[in-house]
Each structure stands twice: as structure tokens, then as C-alpha cells.
């Protein structure tokens, strides 16, 4: 082998490609951002009917008609 081909082999085995490093940094930043958002209280545990509006409306039962809901109030 010549010195030039040995240099190419050594360079090819030098480390991860740049695009892999870029995606790893972006992924780590996204995970960190989601973790901070969840710890700050914006996580998925706060979803539900009470989050939108006053939260004191009863949920309709499956199969309930509109007239029975109006009469219940």
C-alpha cells in the first residue's frame, strides 16, 4: 500500500461522519427541551376536559341525547 491509500483508510476510520454528529446534537437538544417542558408543568399529564374552559361541566354519557343533557342542568 502506498502512503496515500493508508491516509485515506485512516481518515475513513477516524470517527463518525459530520451528519451523524449533527443529528445527535439535534436529538439531544430536543430531548432536553421536552424534559424541561415536562418538569415545568407542560407535560402530557395535564391533558383533559378541565384544561379547556371552566372544567366544571359534567361529561355526557355515551348514548345520552341532547334533551336529557339540557334537562339535567
Image: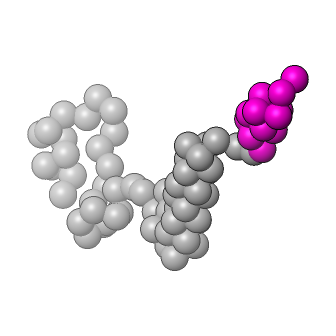
Location of residue 28 in the rendering, given as x and y in whole percent from the top left corner: 61, 57
Q: Looking at this view, name the residue that lies furthest to the top.
A: 1
Which residue occupies the foreground of this view, 1 or 32?
1
Location of residue 70 in the rendering, given as x and y in whole percent from the top left corner: 13, 49
Q: How is the image coloured?
A: one colour
Residue 28 showing in the rendered view:
yes
Q: Residue at x 74, y 40 (%)?
A: 11
Q: Looking at this view, name the residue that lies furthest to the front.
A: 2
Secondary structure mostly seen in magenta is helix
Q: Residue at x 52, y 76 (%)?
A: 40
Q: Residue at x 55, y 51 (%)?
A: 22
Quadrant of res 48: bottom left
Q: Residue at x 64, y 41 (%)?
A: 17
Residue 27 is left or right of residue 60, and the answer is right
Which residue occupies the foreground of this view, 57 or 6?
6
Up the image or down, 33 lies above or below 67; here it is: below
User: In the rendered structure, which segment of residues is drawn in magenta?
Assistant: 1-14
Quadrant of res 2: top right
Quarter of the image with the N terminus is: top right
| The stretch drawn in magenta includes residue 59 | no
Residue 31 is left or right of residue 10, and the answer is left
Which residue occupies the foreground of this view, 73 or 13?
13
Quarter of the image with the C terminus is: bottom left
Which residue occupies the foreground of this view, 4 or 65?
4
Location of residue 71 in the rendering, given as x and y in whole percent from the top left corner: 15, 49
Q: Looking at this view, name the residue that lies furthest to the bottom.
A: 40
Residue 31 showing in the rendered view:
no
Amino acid at each position: 500500500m502506498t502512503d496515500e491509500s493508508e491516509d485515506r483508510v485512516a481518515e475513513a476510520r477516524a470517527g463518525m461522519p459530520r451528519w451523524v454528529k449533527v443529528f445527535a446534537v439535534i436529538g439531544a437538544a430536543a430531548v432536553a427541551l421536552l424534559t424541561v417542558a415536562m418538569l415545568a408543568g407542560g407535560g402530557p399529564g395535564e391533558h383533559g376536559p378541565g384544561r379547556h374552559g371552566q372544567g366544571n361541566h359534567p361529561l355526557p354519557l355515551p348514548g345520552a341525547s341532547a334533551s336529557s343533557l339540557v334537562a339535567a342542568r
